[in-house]
Image (tube, coloured by chain):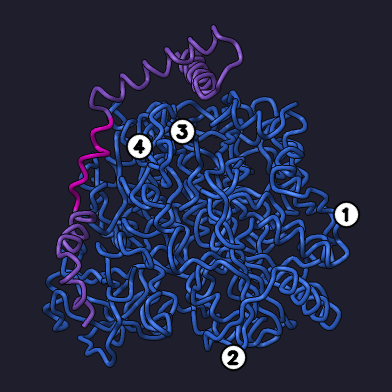
Amino acid sequence: METKHVLCATCDISCQLVATRKDGEKDYELTGDFDNPMAPGAICAKGKIAQSTFDHPNRLLKPLKRVGERGAGEWEEISWDQAMDEIAAKLRKVVDEHGPEALAVTSGPWNCSNECGMTRRFMNLLGTPNYISPVALCLGNTAAVNRFTYGWMPLPDFENTQCIVVMGHNTHTQSWVWEYIRQRLAEQRGAKLIVFDPRRSPVAERADIHLAIKPGTDLAMCMGWIRVILEEELYDKGFVRDWTIGIDALRERIDQQFPMQRVVALTGVAESDIRESARMYATAKGAIIPWSPITDQQVSSTSAIRAISILRSITGNLDAPGGEMLMGTEEGGVMPESVLELTELLSDEQKRKQLGYEKHPAFTFKSADAFAEHSERVFGERYPNIVKGTHMAVPSPTFRAMAYGDPYPVKAFIAIANNALMGYGNQHLIYKAMMNQDLNVCFEQFMTPTANLCDYVLPGDSWMERPNMMDFYNWATLTMTGHKLYDPPGECRNVYDFWHDLAHRMDLGEHFPWRTITELYDHRLETTGYKFEEFKDRYKLRVFPNKYYNYRETGFATPSGKVELFSSVLDEWGLDPLPYYRNLETTDEFPLKMFVGLREPQYFQSAQRHNRKLRKGNRVPRTFVNPADAERYGLVDGEWASIETVAGKIHMKVAVRDDLPEGLIRVPHGWWLPEEKDLGAFEHNDGIVIPDSDEYLDREQGIPHLKGVPCRVAPHVLAREYVGMNGVV
Amino acid sequence: MASFSVWRAEFMMRVAGFVSQEHPSAVKRSIARLLRWVGRHRQRSGALDFLEDETSIDHMDFEALDDEGDEASQHENR
């Protein structure tokens, strides 16, 4: 029997799995690792049958070059050398004509989990700041916004906590399993559970208190809690006195803009419930508010994340047992990706060209530079790239520059393991942007709608086909490793090979001296005294001993060295230094609200729909509608409906469910149909109905609103027949 | 009291780091094995039953579709 540990990169969680295979067998059996001390047994269906996802007839096996019109799906197979020669020549031409900033790169960091900072390294050496990623709408932006208050992104201490506040985030056995297990074990140890969610979700049904807020009002509820905590003096007075600035300004903001009657009116929750839940959170001996994608995706995102940060701070939960750990990265441990990225080589002039830098600076280089010296002082890293989200370009301005050349032309686009066409708001704009490029390149495992618009599509390996080492996204002092189980099929290669080969053709080869990803790992491990092969055998999971209350020695990584309830950085930029309320409201034309989300058990984002085993349980995109709304708008369970916003129209099957409140419908993320000739890319995806004009964007970050977009629904008659499951193998 | 909770939390993280390693020393390997056994034993006494018992609407809803089988699926989208 062969047994290896492996690191799943199906989603962003990276569960540690155990792979076993009997002698002579081809396939591995994958199970959760019950020896893992943090999340024993974590695995989902996607991970369990991952081999059938990758070992699939749809898998790309050779480099492809477009031969027909862009998007027509006509290709010829070429060699890697020819592909890289031609890509390098075309990229050089774009850079010569328009400057290095004319290259934009999008990357889904979890899909190629061993990127090791090489994407940013290449970009920084070339001179382009225009890196975008879906983490702009999911966790990465949270990491950046957390820095305004205390300089780092905290990791919740589930193992010691006594109270968990879940903001609409539905972890379960098939999604965010690692976090789900930690949460359920904490609940079994007696931790209280408070849930913010308009929906009567499974998590809400387990909660001690369920606050069924109106969509997009998380910020208002947090400000209501702050009001209660200040009024009833439930805050940590010593911490607030010694380690914060801005408490008076915060009190004034609460008094002027968040009287309790307004909080009640905005959230739709009774005052008694607001007070009781605030007390439960504030008086727990160790309480956490784990990250939630819900507050990442609202017009009030920055304010909501700031308000959460303030709650963590004034209740004394920062860097406290059972609270929120500010871990930094391991001193003398694995070289962080941020060091490999060589951000300091990108000139100030080029940083300022980053798209979105002035208008929406929260996670751009403007922000990274504001915290650089403070971060270096406290965490020893000048440009930490926490969750790869702390110095990105802003997606909407980037796609506008690609489509219209405003404020300057972006003419080359590289998508690394990211189905970008389906991954951001305003899909029409992304399509236009990609069609206006001189060069589109995709590094992928399958022919996605994004790959289909490219000039070159390069076949990538999977997490079962590469050795793995992850430093927990530069977030915490944890490092994980995994074995390579077997060789990549066909000519599939590792993402490092792509950047290595491109760099060597662009006169940047001296900065990419490692011949393989394993040599790069060896380099990253130099300070530990290990080679990767030894390190991997020694550590499945390396947990660097954490100490609490580190700030007592170092201060916080903010300009004042304290927790900034009133953000000096936002204030200096002329933005509101305190949380404020914004939301979108329904109209006669668009009388309902829709939210994008509620992750489906079978899929991660826009992936896996080609796998018959998974698709059987989830064949078509479905909108969930309350029975009263279904009746009001003539919708029938199991029939098709159209959903329309100011941005466009999509259609989905109706599922009538009473867990949704009246007036709110649900739209799933990332639906396309790999079995269809046109890939079904322009009929179902949520990005089609997500607007990205100014009133629909968070001001500080420039990310779109996904949690309560005004919309309308109507019965829909299909104008075409689908291949359906007959085409899914 | 606060210092004890800090000590305990920091100690447990050290234990987590210890059991996650494959130690060169035979003695340490034995201790780590014992600690892992304790951990597994604790989990197997029912603490992880929730991993097998997923009855929420967000799952059952999809499982119902899966039960329709392949034949039904051929007409699913029509």
Dot 2 alpha-carbon crowd within 10 angstroms: few under 14, some 14 to 19, many 20 or more: few
| Secondary structure that dominates the magenta span | loop
**Dots 4 and 1 on the same chain:** yes
As helix, strand or loop, the secondary structure at mark 4 comes to: helix
Q: Nearer the viewer, residue A636 or A614?
A: A614
Residue B55 in the magenta stretch? The answer is yes
Query: Looking at the image, which residue is at 27% across and 24% down?
Result: B44
- Residue picked out by circle 1: A510
Q: Report the chain holding disc 2.
A: A
Q: Label 4: how many residues lie within 10 Å, few (<14), some (14-19) or many (20+)?
A: many
Q: Nearer the viewer, mark 4 or mark 3?
A: 3
Q: Where on the picture, by quarter, is residue A673?
A: bottom left
In the rendered structure, which segment of residues is drawn in magenta? B48-56
Q: Say which chain tag 3 marks.
A: A
Mark 3 vs mark 1, foreground winner is 3
The question of residue A398 being in magenta is answered with: no
Q: Which residue is mark 2?
A: A68
Q: Are marks 2 and 3 on the same chain?
A: yes
Question: Mark number for residue A181?
Answer: 4
Q: Compare marks 2 and 3 and give the one earlier in the sequence.
A: 3
| Sequence-wise first label, 3 or 1 | 3
